[in-house]
Every structure is written in structure tokens, then in C-alpha cells.
Image: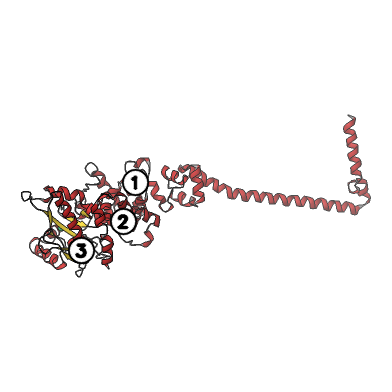
Amino acid sequence: MSMPRKKKRKRRRWRLTLPSHNPEYLKTHPEAAQKKKKRHRRRWRLTWKAWLLLGSACALALALILPIMAENSKLKGLGYSSAAIKEIRKDKLTKTILDSKWYSEYLSDSLADQSVNLSYLQLYTAVTPAHKDVITSLDATDFLLYSRLIDRGYTADQAVRLFGSLHRWEITPLLVFDYQANDQAYIDDCVSHRDTNSQDHFELSGTYYTYYGNTEAVSDPGSIDMLVNKTWSLDSSYTPPQLTDISTRYAAAGRQLASTAADAFVTWSDAGAAVGVTFYAASAYRDYASQESVYNSYLKTLGQAATDAASARPGYSEHQSGYAVDIAATNEDDTPEYKDTRAYQWTSTNSMDYGWILRYPDGKQQITGYEFESWHYRYLGVELAQAVAASHLTYDEFWCLYLKGWDDPANQPSQDILTATDYRKEASASASPSSSASSAASASPAASASAAG
Ligand SMILES: [Zn+2]
């Protein structure tokens, strides 16, 4: 008991040492009392200011943090993982993603492991468990195809719907076809043919390609990879680079091809003869005027529709390019159709190793616009021909996907995607080093390119 009293007394004694704390003193000194009052007020005022400052700092912090917390919770609500949300914030994608409500587990995972390609964010939403029959991941070819669809006039929503509904080989024909405003009708048609269609056989009930409907002039006439079809045409003045006669040992009299194609045909034909398969060029280069007279003679008797089914319009025949040949078998006279010959068995399986492709395959009529022509081959050089064969695409699709110029340069993908999808990489990887034909003909593209100008 005595201890605290002692303390108290001590404190009082200390207090009493300050005059301003002594009420007796202040009573007798009013100016000191006034001073104390002022000081007190000032101290009180300072404290009030500090509180205000602290309060507004807190309010500001809350104003900053609360929306972030709200956004994060919305992102979480869409299904994004914490790691994905971190990347979304880092890449400033919060508004984009929340406004459009884009989500798929694949997108979340790709964001989280930083493998996402930010230019194709929406396309990632096509990859969902519900679409796993047609798509389970995205690669550079998908990004290229998506960009091509956009360049073809499809909206991002349409493109994403196509990717979520169709196999890649069901989408690539759209690059050749007319623009389909009603993409759902096309999707339904594809789906209804799933039982019989494959990447090597593609049929549809509807028609999606208006032959000669949206025609364009070949942009690089003479180049070995140019596309000539029922959309892309050659001028009446076009003649193939270094048009060369083919020896009658290998062709009917007077047949000609661009020099690279003529050389490659001889190499191919010699390789066939070496294993007892003999064939020759029944038809090769046809100029514009002769195609015109053939077409017009049909037109007089058959009418437009039947003529278009039987003959290419002048300028639209691949034979005018100087890179196309119609083959006939020799020593197989009892077999009227080339597709039934031993020569066809041989040419159709190895043409790509000699730089040629079967241009109008069976089962791709609706894409090429031509009935199956077992005899018609197109020279592309070994690299490109092997890449086309490996792709299972018609040349029409392959060219539209990999080689066509861009209608709007803004739609062109980044250089890494163009590099990753360069057919020359695939061709060199799959080319057999043991094939002497490959090395013999691989010089051709370069030679033709220099002659093309
Ligand atoms: Zn032909």
C-alpha cells in the first residue's frame, strides 16, 4: 500500500515543478493560463489533422484495392486460377477478359504457364472439354489458319465457332470457298458427313464454291508455286518461263513444259522405266488461245454449265502454267482408265519425291472444282510437293493457307508463326536423304524462281 502512494506523491511533486501544471500558479498568472489553452488547442488540432490524413490514406488504399479484389473475384468466378489471374493482371488483360467473359481451362492454364499467345486470346476459348473431339490444343498452324479466316472476312466469333466445331481439315476448304456468312450451315453440313469424310475424302451436301465467282489475276505468274484454279487466272499473254520441248521419248510430239518441269518429268519417267513402269506426257503446256478454242467449241454444243463442268475457261487452266502434265501409260493398252494402270499405282505414290502432286485427287472434287483426274500432275519442286502431300490438303487449300498474300497486312501473323509454319522446314525434315531424285530436283525451285521475273 505504501509503495503506490509513494509513487503518486513523487509524480505530483514532478508535476508541481512545471508552473503551467500548477493550478495555483495559473490562477495567479492568467497569461500562462492563456498560453496553455492555446497550446492545448494546437495539439488537439494537429491530432485531428493526422486523423484526417490517415483516414484519407486508408480510403485511397481501399479505393485502389477494392476494385482489384472485386475484379480478381470475378476472374475467379469465371474459373481462372490464381496463377492465371496474376498473369492477366501483369498483361493488363483484366478488362478485355471480363468484358468478353472469355474463359476456358486451356486458356487459364496457358496463361498460368505463360505459353499463351496474346494475339489469339479468344481462340483459346474454343479449346474446351466439350470440343475435345475436334480440338485439344493450339499450335502455330491453328494461329495461321485463324488469321487466314479473319483475312477471308470471317469475324473472330465465327472463327472461334469454326475451331470449336470442326476439324482443321474441315475448316481449310473455307479458304478456297466463297465467304460463308452462315457459318453454322457449313458446320452442320460438315458434321452430317462425319461418318464418311476424312482428311482424304471430303464431301458436302451444299455448294460453297462459285466457280469463276470471285476471280482474281495470278499475282506472281511464272513462279513455281503459283495457284491456277477456278478463282485465280493467267493472262492471255502469259507464257511459261523457259518453255522447253519434251523429247518424244517421254511425250507425244510437240509437248512442252517450263524447263524445270520438263527436266523433272524426264527424271521421274526414267525412274519409272528403271522399275518397269512406263508412261509419257500425253498433254502438257496449252496456251491461252488453244484453251479458248477448246472451251468455245464445247460452249457451242453444250451450253455454259456443261461446258464449265468439262473444260476450264481460258486463263483458268493449269496447263497454261507450263507446270502441269497429263500422263498416259504405255504398254497397258488393255487398261482404258489411267487410274486402273500399274503406272498410276506407281506415279500416285511417289510423285512428290520427284516434285509432282496429283492435283485433282479423288474425294476432293468440291474443293478443287474438278472431278478426280488420276492422270493430271502438277510440278511444284520436291520440297513443296512433299509438304503438300504430307499436309493431306489440296493445293488450293495449301496455297491459300501457307503461300497466299494477305488482303489486309494487319491480319498477317507475327514472324515466329510464319517461320514455324514455313513448309520448307517440314519438307527438309521429311525429305529422304537416300532419294537421289530429291537432290536432283531440289535445285529446281531456285532455278525457276530466278527465271520467274
Ligand atoms: Zn490435265
Residue 194 sits in quarter:
top left
Which of labels 2 and 3 is toward the front? 3
Do we see residue 95 in this rendering?
Answer: yes
**Label 2 lies in ligand 1 vicinity (Cβ under 8 Å):** no
Identify residue for label 2: 402
Q: Is residue 217 left or right of residue 98?
A: left
Q: Earlier in the sequence, mark 3 or mark 1?
A: 1
Q: Nearer the viewer, residue 288 or 109?
A: 288
Q: Earlier in the sequence, mark 2 or mark 3?
A: 3
Q: CA distance from mark 1 to mark 2?
A: 22 Å
What amino acid type should be assigned to the residue bearing mark 2? Tyr
Do we see residue 207 in this rendering?
Answer: no
Vertical side of 121 occupied by 295: above or below: below
Instruction: Tell me, yes or no, whether the two marked residues, 1 and 2, touch with CB atoms within 8 Å.
Output: no
Which of labels 3 and 1 is toward the front? 3
Q: Is residue 414 left or right of residue 171?
A: right
Q: Is residue 145 left or right of residue 245?
A: right
- Mark carried by residue 259: 3
Vertical side of 348 occupied by 285: above or below: below
Residue 416 sits in quarter:
bottom left
| Image location (x, y in percent) of residue 136 | 36, 43
Residue furthest out toward the left: 334
What amino acid type should be assigned to the residue bearing mark 3? Ser
Q: Residue at x 37, y 48 (%)?
A: 139
Q: Residue at x 88, y 36 (%)?
A: 8
Q: CA distance from mark 2 to mark 3?
A: 25 Å
What amino acid type should be assigned to the residue bearing mark 1? Gly
| Image location (x, y in percent) of residue 247 | 13, 62
Q: Earlier in the sequence, mark 1 or mark 2?
A: 1
